[in-house]
Image (cartoon, rainbow, N blue to C red):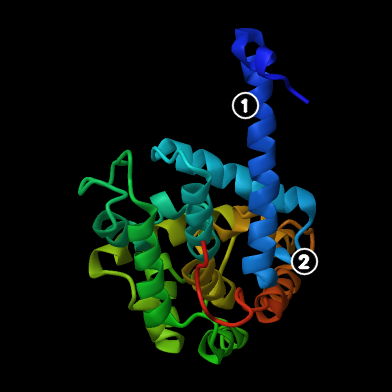
């Protein structure tokens, strides 16, 4: 236990801050498991800790200081992914919520409550926990078109899950399609795999493959199996994904 005299000594301050930070990480991980059992219930301690640590860094970059505000930010990162501040589909929402400047540069000393309202609005529009998303994911299985661009994949995604695609503002389609193009080349995606990748990005955040608590999706792409086997593994992970919330009521912080 660190004594008050240790804190007064400058050499003791880093240890004190580290202990306090670790207590917050433990609290945040327990908070996520309680609020989002579908995502965090099956996640390992290391995966949960990696998520809350990254979210904590994001919060610090936006000027958050209190534990309560950091916990509020966790809600948004679970729904939108840890890349929410650079996600092209969310840029306008982040600006309206006061987290980004109109030129998409970061603001400081932001209000987490405004971000949560934006998350709630998105949730009401998209309803990502419903059957519509799972049905759309399943419809990617017979898609065998080759040579699709990111924009092509986005338009095909719009045909099978329009409520999810059309929540993006029109100016986000180009940047999101470009992000899909980069991923298409990076992972050699084509046909249904590219469309499913687009859907998963819309549902979980466009960098979902780097989310610590979504390791099943990353594992599907990191195998040495054939493209067909990798797609099957990705689709199974998508269809097996449980809802985030137990009772569909959001955000008790």
The residue carrying mark 2 is 42
Residue at 66% across, 28% down: 18
The image quadrant of residue 235 is bottom right
* Left-right relation of 42 to 59: right
Q: Residues within 10 Å of mark 1 (few under 14, many from 20)?
A: few
Q: Left or right: 212 with respect to 192?
A: right
Q: Position of residue 244 (x, y in %)?
A: 61, 73
Residue at image location 59% in from the left, 72% down from the top: 193
Mark carried by residue 185: none
Q: In the depicted view, which residue is nearer to us: 144 or 241?
A: 241
Residue 145: horizontal and vertical position, in percent?
52, 80
Q: Is residue 188 visible?
A: yes
Most extreme residue toward the left is: 102
> Which residue is pictured at 33% across the width and 46% down the height?
110
- Badge 2: few (under 14), some or many (20 or more) residues near its Cα, within 10 Å? few
Q: Position of residue 40 (x, y in %)?
A: 70, 63
Q: State how far apart marks 1 and 2 are (Cα).
A: 30 Å
* Residue 242 against residue 212 in the figure, above or below: below
Q: Is residue 238 left or right of residue 105?
A: right
The image quarter in which residue 34 lies: bottom right
Numbered mark located on residue 17 in the image:
1
- Image coordinates of residue 44 in percent, x first then y, are 79, 56
| Towards the viewer: 51 or 120 | 120
Tell me which numbered mark, 1 or 2, is placed earlier along the sequence.
1
For the residue labelled by badge 1, is the local secondary structure a helix, a strand or a loop?
helix
Against 40, residue 13 (above or below) is above
Q: Nearer the viewer, residue 161 or 174?
A: 161
Q: What residue sits 37% from the left and 58% below the top?
A: 113
């Amino acid at each position: 236990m660190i004594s008050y005299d240790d804190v007064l000594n400058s050499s003791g301050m880093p240890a004190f801050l580290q202990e306090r930070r670790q207590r917050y990480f433990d609290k945040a991980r327990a908070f996520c498991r309680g609020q989002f059992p579908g995502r965090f219930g099956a996640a390992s301690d290391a995966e949960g800790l990696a998520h809350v640590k990254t979210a904590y860094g994001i919060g610090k970059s936006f000027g958050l200081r209190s534990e309560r505000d950091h916990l509020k930010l966790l809600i948004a990162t679970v729904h939108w992914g840890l890349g929410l501040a650079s996600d092209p589909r969310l840029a306008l929402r982040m600006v309206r919520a006061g987290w980004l400047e109109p030129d998409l540069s970061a603001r400081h000393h932001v209000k987490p409550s405004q971000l949560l309202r934006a998350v709630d609005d998105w949730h009401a529009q998209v309803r990502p926990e419903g059957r519509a998303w799972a049905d759309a994911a399943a419809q990617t299985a017979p898609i065998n078109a080759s040579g699709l661009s990111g924009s092509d994949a986005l338009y095909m995604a719009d045909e099978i899950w329009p409520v999810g695609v059309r929540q993006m503002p029109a100016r986000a389609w180009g940047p999101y399609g470009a992000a899909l193009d980069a991923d298409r080349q990076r992972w050699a995606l084509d046909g249904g795999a590219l469309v499913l990748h687009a859907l998963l990005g819309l549902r979980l955040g466009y960098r979902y493959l780097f989310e610590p608590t979504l390791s099943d999706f990353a594992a599907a792409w990191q195998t040495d199996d054939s493209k067909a086997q990798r797609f099957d593994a990705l689709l199974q992970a998508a269809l097996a994904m449980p809802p985030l919330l137990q009772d569909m009521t959001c955000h008790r912080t």
